[in-house]
Structure formats: structure tokens, C-alpha cells
Image (tube, rainbow, N blue to C red):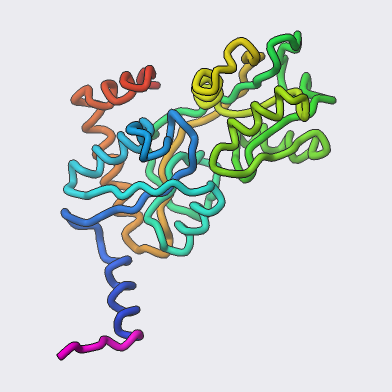
Amino acid sequence: MTLKMPFRWLAVILAALATAPAQAGDSVILTADHWCPHTCDPQSGHAGYMIDIAREALALAGLKTIYQLRPWATGLNEVRSGLADGIVGILPTEAPDLPRNHLALGRQANAIAVRADDTFSLDGLGSLAGRQIATVKDYSYSAAIDSWLLDHAPQVSAQSGDHAAEGNLDRLLNQSVDTVLDDEAVLRETIIRTAKSTKVRIAGHLSGGSLHIAFSPARQRGKALADILDDGIARLRQTGRLAEILASYGLADWE
């Protein structure tokens, strides 16, 4: 005879599992958008160096990582509602309502891309006056850049979707915009992968920041996961494994 569990009791059990303290053998659900090489398509064979670092850091405490690719705004909503444990690639000033770990899993360095025949050279944010700038919807670049973009909204058009970097470079080449703002590593990876090296160039750099994982306030184990992650990152750096992960993506440790 099959016993059916009342829905209200099933909901209570699921909620208890979601808010229980992290223990060895637990699964941790992490979400991120396509922002390669930081966070990449998990089906590509390279999940992204930040995902690799997080997975190995959490595994040191016996935790299994489940990585899900989501648009950035969707991922933030899922973390806030408790559908995922954490979102990967957040700046310290971004989403201040979410608890986050302290040790960086990566670095953001913003850059400007233009068409190869464009003679423009970036000389601070003021030099962007009058240019049509493509950004990524719902992204934060830095407090100063975000403020400038907001003050110059008529010049800015934001691309949404899972592959916004590719879309923005296409818009650059079809002259819908004349400037693309994004993370430098993301721009370079996308330019190379889409065979645009002879058509697009980097025209300057802007400040960025350290990248972290923000955890769900709806899951009461967020602080414990942040501490476990920080401990794991420190151990990976001490053993040299963090440098090995970064080297596999052609990157070096930022410390």
C-alpha cells in the first residue's frame, strides 16, 4: 500500500533541508550566468575558473557543488528566494542584502572594445561622452562606472540574454553601437572564440573589483557556507592548487 504524504508536511521537510546547517555530503547549488572565463557553460568541459575554485574549495569540506547556468537577474532572484544557495561572480558593493564570502575567487578588470578601424582611445570615463555604449543588462561594473552610466542613460543600451557579450560585439560590428563595456577577460575570450580578433580591439581599461559568491538569506546556512568557502580558498592557495586552476585558463593569481 502506498502512503501519500500531505503536501503541507512535504513542504515542511523541504524547508528544513534547505535551512539546515551545511554538513559533509550535502549538495550546494551555485548559479551564475555565461561570463567566460569566470563562469562558463557547464556542458563545454570548462565550467569557468571561479566554478572550479568554488567546487574544489567546498569539496575539501565534503560538499558537492551543483552548478546551474542562469541569466544574472534570474540567478539573483533564485538566490534571494532560496532556490539556490549562492550566485557566483558578485562585486563587494553589489546586492548588499546578500551575505557573501570574504576571500576573492576572481578579479574583474573592465575594458572598452571598439571596431578595429576606430581610432578612439579611452582617457577616463569623461572621454566616453557622446559615444553609444553597449553594456550587459543588470550587471554592475563598479560604483563609479555604474553611477556614470546612470547619469548618461541616453548613451547606454543594455543587452540581455545568456550570451550578452557575443550580442554586444555583433552590435558593435553592425554599427548599432560604437563602444562595448565588459570585463576584459570576457571580452578577450569572446573576441577570440568568435573569430573577431581582426575586427575588434581593446581601446582602454577601467577599474573593476574583486569577485565573490553571495549566498541566500532564505537558506540559513549561508554564513556557514561562506566560512567554509573562505577556508577552502585559503587552503587551495596554500597548496598551489588555486594557481594550477587559474593557469588552466591562462590566468595568474591576483595576490
Q: Name the main secondary structure of what is drawn in magenta.
A: loop
- Residue at 27 percent across and 66 percent down: it is 20
In terms of depth relative to the viewer, which is nearer, 86 or 178? 178
Query: Does residue 54 lie above or below 188 as drawn?
Result: below
Range shown magenta: 1-7
Query: Does residue 53 lie above or below 31 as drawn?
Result: above
73 magenta-colored = no
Residue 45, located in which quarter of the rendered image? Answer: top left
- Residue at 60 percent across and 39 percent down: it is 140
- Residue at 48 percent across and 49 percent down: it is 70
In terms of depth relative to the viewer, which is nearer, 108 or 170? 170
Residue 184 image offset from top left, x and y in percent: 54, 22
- Residue at 70 percent across and 16 percent down: it is 115
Residue 55 image offset from top left, x and y in percent: 28, 41
Camera sees residue 204? yes
Residue 16 image offset from top left, x and y in percent: 29, 72
Camera sees residue 50? no
